[in-house]
Structure formats: structure tokens, C-alpha cells
Image (cartoon, rainbow, N blue to C red):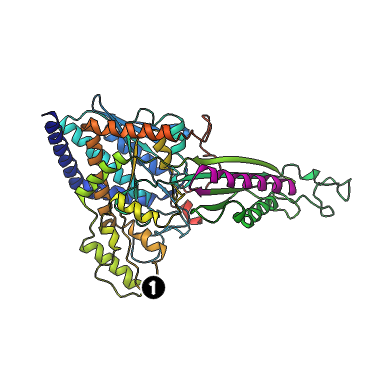
């Protein structure tokens, strides 16, 4: 009798949540456009976070702005009495150099350079979709007397694996019973499905700073009586730029000496801008380079770290510089949870994959026409309108991986999986079917489709309903949470992975990351 009553409650609550999303879909899409147009890069998402904080407070949530010492993070909570605590989150960082207008031609937003930031994944729809699920769940909990607590965190700088490790270390995920992690589809076969066994792997990122603060001690000047340490008649210190270039070239040349070229590991670099001397007889005083690397496991990441640390130390010595290194991120591979994956996929299956209607098709065909292609009847990638079970997606994924490899690609949701049972799922974002003989579409096409209301709204609809349905299952069916917790405990005991950064780790918000406070500032990009 109790089971039947619980089932009826869950069914009714889900219907109420779905009706709320349907009634508010236009408003949700408008919210998405706002975040998409803010397009602020990592650690600089000031307007985006303010928008979320104000919205959540308006909806009755208690919100801590600047959570974990991160100015563009937040932690929000709303309770409807004693019961389980479930969590999801928003991301909202954009990518420098990828600005694109919400239009069918390649062009930046009005008044901006194409080198300004833009949403690529897009994280804008990640946040608004989970917010839709959160608010729909809240509405259903009120209407049907469902008890429990909703937590919602704002996670800046995902592209740098920035905030989740900090939130985790500082206790923001403590006491959570289950976490739902969403990301718009970005690679096949992970489209309209949940991850099964193969979670994302390890991610390390470090900034190496070379400082030449004592150029006068490089060697004895040709004229020891000169009051200028780097006079034109003296050999001057190589300086920070030389150290940076030595580090960069040595590390790139030695890439195949870090790890074998298997397992899908990768390394990337970025040079951070600092003020430089303009006088022709003064060495550059400071230079910074960031290396980030993705590996299937921690042991592989540590091999890369050993080589990079050695190269940095020797490059600094060669160029008469001091070296400072600083962690940006250090994430563990993810833990899977089959119980939650099955619960979530059942909700996604009941909702169905996104469907792109006549208006969306017309927009896609216009893009094809503007690219000199013959418009196709069904322009969207077939897989974006299809479901694939977690098990089938897993089998397809494993076909491209060596048998020893347990994790693939990288995303910082993995840190959450070490604090509570977590499910990671994907819903399609609009993507076009490649035309035979023409290859992939240019990157701006997916970026533009991610900002056009008619093409991105189906993602918000399906993902929001999936989050709400999963939350309501977990809040009303205690046996599901018990099973998920048991699986989490067993997996944690079988493969313990302590946190990789110290308890006093602080987010690197003070480094010279690309900034973008407003439209006027973005004109320089």
C-alpha cells in the first residue's frame, strides 16, 4: 500500500513539474539568452553570477554569494522540511576568442570582436537547464508536500576545472545524498544518455611563473662603473621571456617522452599576459605559462607533472630567473553509480529526445544556404533526436579505447563523484549533419545554434524535465537513495582516492586571466 501511495505521489509530482516547465519554457529560453549574451570568461563571470544569485533569492532560496572564497561562485539552498538533500549546479563561463552572434552567418555580436569570449559548449544552457529542473522540482514539492532539500551551486571556471575541487574541499557537498550532473552533448556516442562505467579522467593544471628580479647579478658588467645595470655596453640577463620559451619548447619537444601516445591523453598550454618592459635594454621581468593535461588516471598525470616541473626548474636557471609554480586544478577520475544512471535514464526515456521543429529546421537550412550548401530536408545530426541507453553508449565508447583504460576525456564534475552518489547525463544541443564530401561544419555554426532560441529551447525542455523527474524520484523513493549510497560506499572502499590538493587550497582568482567586464571592454579583443 505504501509503495502504491509513493508511486502515485511521484507520478503526480512529475506531472506538475513538467507542466511548470511547459508553462515557463519561453521565460527559461529568455533567461538563457541573457546568460549567453553575457559570455564572460573563467573567473570573471561577474554579471552571470549576479543574475543567478538574484534569481534564486527571488525564488526563495538562501544564497551564499562568493562561496568558497570565489567571487563568481555561489551556493544556494531551499528546504521543504526533513528529507533527502539533492544537488545540481550551474556553469556559465565562456571561451575567449569564440564570440559569435545568434545568427545564421559567421559574425560576432554587435560591437564586439570575434576574439571576445563566446559560449561554445554552451555552458549557458547547462545552467539554465538545471535551473529549470530545480525550480520545477521546487514547485512540485510545494504543490504535493514533498519533503527534502534542494541545493544548487554556481560553478565558475569549468574550462579550468576551477571551482568544484574548491567547493569540495571546503565542505559544500557534505551532507548531500545525490548529485545530478548535466552537460549538453559534445561528442558521440554520449548524446541523450547517461554515462555508465567510463567516467571522465584526471585533470591537472599548473601555472609556472618566471621572474627576473635581479637582472644586475647576471654577470659583471663591461663597465663596472655604469650606474645602469643593463647598459648598452653590457650583456644583459636573458629574462623571463627566455625562460618561458625554453619551458614551452622543451616541453613540446619532449611530449612523447612524458607518456606513450595511447589512452587519449592530451596536454595544452596558454601564455598569461603580464606587463612587460618597453625599453630595449631591459629584460622582461615576469612571464607566465599554464600547462593543462588530461589523462585517464592519476599515475599518468603524475608522469607528465614530473617532466614539466623539471623543465620549468631548468628553464628558470638558464634564464637567470626565479621560479614559482601554482596549482590551478588537480582533479581525480570519476566514480560511476549505476543506480542513479538507471533512475535518470528512465526519466529521460519517458520524456524522449529533443525534437527540432519547423522553425529550427528553417534556421538550420538558412545556415546551410549561407555556406553555399544545398539545404537538406533533415539538417540536424540524426543522433541529436535519438536516445541511446547508457549500456549501448558504453559499448560504443569502449570500441575506441584500449582495454586497460578506465576513464576518458575530462570534466570537473568528477570531483563531485567523490563526495556523493553522482550521475552524469547528456542531452543533445543543436548540431548539423555533415554533408557528404564537405566534412564538418565550421565551429561558429554550433556556437550560433547554441544561442538561437528556436534551436536551443528543446535542450532546456528535455534536460530540465530530466533533472526534475530524477530529483522527484530520489526525494519520494527512499529505497533508490539507499541503493545508490550502498553502491557509492562499496566503490569508494574498493578504490580510495584522497583529494589531491591541500585543505587550505585557494582558487587562483588573482592571476591575470582574460578579463571582460562589459561590452566596451570587449572591443579590444
Q: Residue furthest left?
A: 1
Residue at 21% over, 61% down = 357
Q: Residues within 10 Å of mark 1 (few under 14, many from 20)?
A: few
Side of 448 relative to 362 (left or right): right
Residue on which disc 1 sits: 438
Q: Position of residue 331 (x, y in %)?
A: 48, 40
Q: How many marks?
A: 1
The N terminus lies in quadrant = top left
- Residue 420 visible in the shown view: no
Q: Secondary structure at mark 1?
A: loop
Q: Is residue 294 magenta?
A: yes
Q: Which residues are magenta?
A: 293-318
Is residue 208 positioned above or below 455 on the image?
Answer: above
The residue under the point 46% across, 55% down is 116
Left or right placement of residue 86 versus residue 476 in this view: right
Q: Residue at x 23, y 30 (%)?
A: 478
Of all residues, the one furthest to the top in this rendering is 82
Secondary structure mostly seen in the magenta stretch: helix
Q: Nearer the viewer, residue 137 or 470?
A: 470
Q: Position of residue 290 (x, y in %)?
A: 57, 48
In-front residue for pair 49/185? 185
Q: Position of residue 335 (x, y in %)?
A: 40, 40
Instruction: Name the residue nearer the viewer: 521 or 101.
Output: 101
Q: Is residue 224 above or below residue 232?
A: above
Q: Determine the residue located farthest toward the front in the rendered image.
A: 403
Q: From the top left corner, tell me how far across and down residue 192 is, in percent.
A: 29, 52
Q: Is residue 197 magenta?
A: no
Q: Can residue 294 be seen in this snapshot?
A: yes
**Residue 475 sits above or below residue 304 on the image:** above
Amino acid at each position: 500500500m505504501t509503495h502504491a501511495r509513493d508511486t502515485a505521489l511521484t507520478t503526480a509530482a512529475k506531472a506538475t513539474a513538467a507542466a511548470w516547465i511547459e508553462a515557463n519554457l519561453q521565460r527559461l529560453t529568455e533567461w538563457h539568452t541573457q546568460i549567453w549574451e553575457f559570455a564572460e570568461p573563467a573567473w570573471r563571470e561577474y554579471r552571470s553570477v549576479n543574475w543567478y544569485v538574484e534569481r534564486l533569492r527571488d525564488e526563495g532560496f538562501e544564497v551564499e554569494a562568493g562561496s568558497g572564497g570565489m567571487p563568481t561562485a555561489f551556493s544556494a539552498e531551499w528546504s521543504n522540511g526533513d528529507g533527502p538533500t539533492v544537488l545540481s549546479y550551474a556553469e556559465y563561463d565562456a571561451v575567449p576568442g569564440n564570440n559569435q552572434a545568434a545568427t545564421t552567418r559567421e559574425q560576432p555580436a554587435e560591437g564586439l570582436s570575434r576574439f571576445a569570449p563566446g559560449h561554445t559548449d554552451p555552458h549557458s544552457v547547462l545552467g539554465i537547464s538545471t535551473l529549470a529542473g530545480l525550480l520545477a522540482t521546487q514547485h512540485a514539492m510545494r504543490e504535493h508536500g514533498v519533503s527534502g532539500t534542494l541545493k544548487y551551486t554556481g560553478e565558475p571556471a569549468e574550462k579550468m576545472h576551477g571551482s568544484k575541487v574548491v567547493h569540495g574541499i571546503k565542505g559544500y557537498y557534505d551532507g548531500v545524498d545525490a548529485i545530478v550532473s548535466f552537460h549538453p552533448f559534445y561528442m558521440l556516442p554520449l548524446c541523450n544518455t547517461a554515462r555508465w562505467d567510463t567516467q571522465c579522467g584526471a585533470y591537472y593544471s599548473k601555472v609556472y611563473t618566471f621572474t627576473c628580479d635581479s637582472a644586475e647579478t647576471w654577470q659583471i658588467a663591461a663597465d663596472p662603473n655604469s650606474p645602469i645595470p643593463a647598459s648598452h655596453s653590457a650583456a644583459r640577463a636573458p629574462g623571463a621571456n627566455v625562460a618561458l620559451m625554453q619551458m614551452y619548447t622543451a616541453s613540446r619537444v619532449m611530449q612523447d617522452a612524458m607518456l606513450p601516445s595511447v589512452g587519449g591523453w592530451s596536454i595544452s598550454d596558454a601564455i598569461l599576459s603580464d606587463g612587460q618592459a618597453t625599453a630595449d635594454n631591459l629584460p622582461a621581468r615576469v612571464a607566465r605559462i599554464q600547462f593543462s593535461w588530461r589523462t585517464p588516471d592519476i599515475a599518468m598525470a603524475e608522469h607528465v607533472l614530473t617532466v614539466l616541473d623539471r623543465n620549468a626548474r631548468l628553464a628558470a636557471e638558464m634564464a637567470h630567473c626565479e621560479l614559482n609554480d601554482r596549482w590551478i586544478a588537480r582533479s581525480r577520475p570519476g566514480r560511476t553509480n549505476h543506480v542513479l544512471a538507471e533512475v535518470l535514464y528512465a526519466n529521460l526515456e519517458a520524456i524522449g529526445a529533443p525534437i527540432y521543429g519547423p522553425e529550427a529546421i528553417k534556421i538550420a537550412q538558412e545556415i546551410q544556404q549561407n555556406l553555399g550548401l544545398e539545404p537538406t530536408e533533415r539538417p540536424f545530426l540524426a543522433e541529436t533526436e535519438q536516445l541511446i541507453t547508457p549500456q549501448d553508449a558504453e559499448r560504443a565508447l569502449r570500441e575506441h579505447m584500449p582495454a586497460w583504460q578506465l576513464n576518458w576525456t575530462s570534466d570537473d564534475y568528477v570531483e563531485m563523484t567523490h563526495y556523493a552518489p553522482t550521475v552524469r547525463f547528456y542531452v543533445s544541443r543543436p548540431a548539423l549533419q555533415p554533408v557528404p564530401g564537405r566534412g564538418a561544419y565550421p565551429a561558429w555554426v554550433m556556437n550560433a545554434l547554441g544561442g538561437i532560441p528556436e534551436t536551443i529551447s528543446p535542450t532546456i525542455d528535455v534536460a530540465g524535465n530530466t533533472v526534475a523527474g530524477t530529483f522527484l524520484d530520489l526525494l519520494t523513493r527512499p529505497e533508490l537513495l539507499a541503493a545508490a549510497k550502498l553502491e557509492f560506499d562499496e566503490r569508494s572502499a574498493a578504490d580510495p582516492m584522497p583529494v589531491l590538493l591541500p585543505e587550505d587550497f585557494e582558487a587562483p582568482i588573482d592571476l591575470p586571466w582574460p578579463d571582460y567586464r562589459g561590452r566596451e571592454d570587449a572591443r579590444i579583443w
